Image (cartoon, grey):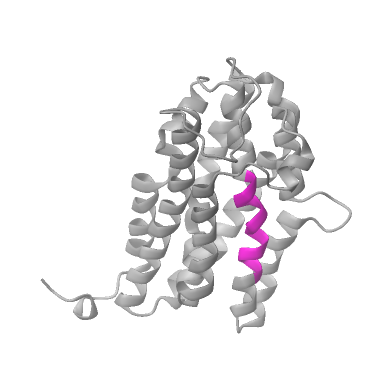
Amino acid sequence: MIEVQEQELLAPAELERRLQAIGAERYHHRHPFHLMMHEGKLTHGQLQAWALNRYYYQSIIPIKDSIILSRGEDSAFRRAWRKRIVDHDGDGTRPGGIEKWIQLAQATGVPSETVIAERGILPAVRYAVNAYIDLVSKRSFLEAVASSLTEMFSRDLISLRVDRLHQHYPWLSGGLAYFDARLTQAPEDARFALAWVTEHAQTRPEQELAIGALSAKCDILWAQLDAIYYAYVTPGWPPPGAFRPDEDQPA
């Protein structure tokens, strides 16, 4: 077998194809929990558990992006990347993604104080999300940026999710502002990150690092849903201290 170091550099189109293939195979749009959501099979309590636990991930996105920003040595990169922080933290006059996610959780019936205090978050969700912070902090800068490329796949998932949430869970319709904003934010961010990774992965080993980082990010997203599925679907064993819905009727 030819060593990676000896293989030819992938052309930009081929590198993008390899990255897109990661999404087709490993992105969490294929997870059973999301499939249940899109088929209208989740109970009210399962939706509450998802919204609450997903908040922990949402809450660290601007922290993750601040870490990447702090590692960037190029001012043009920093100017482009800092919009991600504003998108999620808001600008003091308009709500950002975190506030909008709290509104979504409230729409499911979880009090905002419970969400903000992160009460009842599954331990495995914390481990998975914290692994993302480790990735962007401890691995190469190229890998940190490449890990964000799940945004290449998110628009299609968000479009489907919004449609199915309106269809199957109409009582949630007032809490979906987060997804409306991400329909434009995520593709814009993905275009910048893909162009940057394509330009800066200048050797075949570096290209493989970028591909591996995207795969690792997909694993992190999948692991969060694994934890939620195990605790609230099958076998339905939330650990001590985890959120427990007051009722578990069909949504």
Residue 7 is one of the magenta-drawn residues = no
Looking at the image, residue 247 lies above or below residue 64:
above
**On the rendered image, what quadrant is the C terminus found in?**
top right
Location of residue 86 (image quadrant): bottom right
- In which quadrant of the rendered image does the N terminus lie? bottom left
| Frontmost residue, 66 versus 148 | 66
x, y percent for residue 48: 63, 31
Displayed quadrant of residue 32 = top left
Residue plotted at (41% across, 28% down): 235
What segment carries the magenta color?
A: 55-66
* 62 magenta-colored: yes
Q: Is residue 143 left or right of residue 45?
A: left
Residue sitting nearer the eye, 61 or 245 = 245
Does 142 sit left or right of 13 as displayed? right
Residue at 48 percent of width and 67 percent of height: 135
Extreme-top residue of the structure: 250
User: For the view shown, which residue lies furthest in the bottom direction?
Assistant: 73
Q: Is residue 177 above or below residue 36?
A: below
Which residue is at the far right? Answer: 93
Residue at image position (61%, 64%) is: 64
Magenta span: predominant SS is: helix
Work out whether residue 71 or residue 191 is closer to the camera in this orientation and state it.
71
Quadrant location of residue 46? Answer: top right
Q: How many marks?
A: 0
Q: Is residue 38 left or right of residue 59?
A: left
Farthest residue, direction left: 1
The residue under the point 89% across, 53% down is 93
Location of residue 187 in the rendering, given as x and y in whole percent from the top left corner? 57, 52
Looking at the image, which is closer to me, 51 or 20? Answer: 51
Relative image position of residue 246 (x, y in whole percent) = 66, 23
* x and y, in percent, of residue 31 in the image: 41, 37
Q: Is residue 188 above or below residue 138?
A: above
